[in-house]
Amino acid sequence: MSTRQLTRKPRSFETRRGPALNAALERAFERAEHSKLQILQRPDMLNGETLAAQLGLSRATVDNRRQAGTLLALDLGSKRGFRYPGWQSGLLEEQHRRNTYERVLKRLKSVGAWSRYRFMTQHSPALHGKSPLDALLDGADDAVLRAADTWAAQEQGGG
């Protein structure tokens, strides 16, 4: 799969600042697309059928949860479907942890799937250097929920 296959809409970086800035923006966009492709091709990025089998659910249930926003899925583009981060399995096994994870995703609903993925996997000073994923696994529910609120506000220009 080429990097450009992930892109659904052509992006135009034409600005009044000149060709050097336009070229730099285009290179940055290409690096971001390349990074997304690398993430999607990792072995821990599961298709819906594999995740369903791991969780003991039907494929339709996984798809319904994705559509409801209670499972994180990253779009492969075109007709190739979605990839689910495998680490979600650990957050869905126990009911309380699952409920908290779903609350986090609900609070991040206003931001895109890639932003939600970055939120869950990047280390955060607000969580004592842990990622929200690790903090949830450690039981720091309230701190992760607050961090999700802050993230969503910043992604929407509120911070």
Image: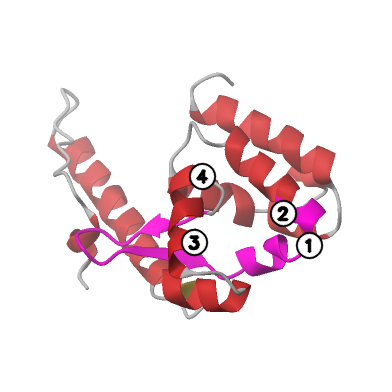
Q: Whole-percent x and y of residue 157?
A: 49, 21
- Pointer 2 residue: 98
- Pointer 4 residue: 69
Q: Is residue 99 left or right of residue 17?
A: right
- Pointer 3 residue: 62
| Dot in front, 3 or 4 | 3
User: How far apart are the alpha carbons under marks 3 and 4?
Assistant: 11 Å
Above or below 14: residue 83: below
The reply to whether the C-beta atoms of the residues labelled 3 and 2 are less than 8 Å apart is no
Residue bounds of the magenta highlight: 72-98
**Which residue: 85% across, 48% down?**
140
Label 4 residue SS: loop
Q: Is residue 14 left or right of residue 105?
A: left
Q: Which mark is residue 109?
A: none
**Which residue: 83% across, 38% down?**
142
Picture quadrant where residue 82 is located: bottom left
**Which residue: 38% across, 61% down?**
36
User: How far apart are the alpha carbons under marks 1 and 3?
Assistant: 17 Å
Q: Whole-percent x and y of residue 78?
A: 19, 59
- Pointer 1 residue: 94
Going by the numbered disc 3, the residue's amino acid type is Val
Q: Is residue 48 left or right of residue 109?
A: left
| Dot in front, 3 or 2 | 3
